[in-house]
Image (spheres, rainbow, N blue to C red):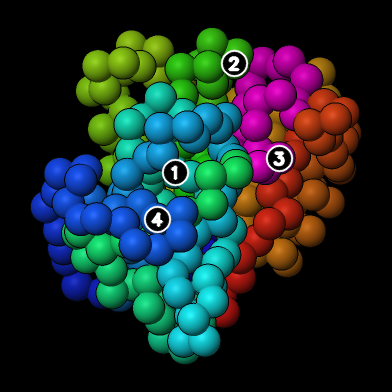
Amino acid sequence: MNESLTLTDAASQTPAAPAKAAKAHLPDAQIVTSVKHWTDRLFSFRVTRPQSLRFRSGEFVMIGLMGDNGKPLLRAYSIASPNWDEALEFYSIKVPDGPLTSKLQHIKVGDEIILRPKPVGTLVHDALLPGKRIWFLATGTGIAPFASLMRDPETYEKYDQVIMMHTCRTADELEYGRQLVENLKADELIGEMVEGKLLYYPTTTREETPHMGRITDNLTSGKVFQDLDLPRMNQAEDRAMVCGSLAFNVDVKAVLESFGLREGANSGPLEYVVEKAFVGEGI
């Protein structure tokens, strides 16, 4: 749920470890089972899942480490894995001076993290009225909740088309999402459901790539509709979920409302929802 920044050399992968790799000592502790560094500012990791944890794809939990003062240092992180996964996946930025990520970026297989098993969030299917198309709109690590939703069969059962718009500054920062979408096509569980339904539209704002520009600009100009051969957004058929920086969320809300969409919530489903638990770049 935070904005990505720069790129680095080739991603490095730490091999997965058995779920019970270490004995838990932290409160609400879970064990790190794999870590992958995508760029010098982006990494993902997987941890064991509490047996009692139930969540809806798209929700977030509080995770963290012990602070220097001996108290838990926690931040909201979207669960990037789908609700059927036996492990929990997270996607994070690295902030050199960030109270949490300055430490979290150094975790290794077998380490412990704190995970409060109380999932919440607005980026869930229950917060939207039925529609024909669902738009996932994300910048940076805001793709995390959609990584969960794109791997959930319910998404393809509810919608005829699923459009993933993801914008970063450089191509390397798009790699996490690109590989996820590519692997979905061969997924044994939902590969057939995804075929012909999932449309992926990655763009960059600094590095030259096939698709350029901010999500707001590509929606307002109509370029994305032309490129994907889709009609302009309308209240009757289109639904949207938004996750990015606070400024991005505000700008996208204005664009969606210009198409006639209204903001919904768990308690009152409408045409679009925004994740308000943005972590920010200071984590």
- How dense is the environment of label 4, judged by Cα within 10 Å: few (below 14), some, or many (20 and up)? many
**Residue 270 position within the rendered picture, expressed as x and y whole percent measured from the top left:** 83, 28
274 on left or right of 42: right
Q: Amino acid at mark 4?
A: Ala
Up-down relation of residue 132 to residue 279 (above or below):
above
Say which label, 2 or 4, has the lower sequence index.
4
2 or 1: mark nearer the eye: 1
**Residue carrying label 4:** 29
276 on left or right of 245: right
SS label for mark 2: loop
Give the Cα distance between marks 2 and 4.
37 Å
SS label for mark 1: loop
**Residue carrying label 1:** 80
**Residue carrying label 3:** 122
Say which label, 4 or 3, has the lower sequence index.
4
Up-down relation of residue 108 to residue 58 (above or below):
below
Say which label, 4 or 1, has the lower sequence index.
4
Say which label, 2 or 1, has the lower sequence index.
1
Give the Cα distance between marks 2 and 3.
18 Å
Give the Cα distance between marks 4 and 3.
25 Å
CB under 8 Å between discs 2 and 4 = no
CB under 8 Å between discs 4 and 1 = no
Point 40% across, 63% down: residue: 26
SS label for mark 3: loop
Q: Amino acid at mark 1?
A: Ala
Q: Amino acid at mark 3?
A: Thr
Say which label, 2 or 3, has the lower sequence index.
3
Residue 6 visible within the image = no
CB under 8 Å between discs 4 and 3 = no
Q: Which residues are magenta?
A: 120-140
Residue 112 visible within the image = yes
122 magenta-colored: yes
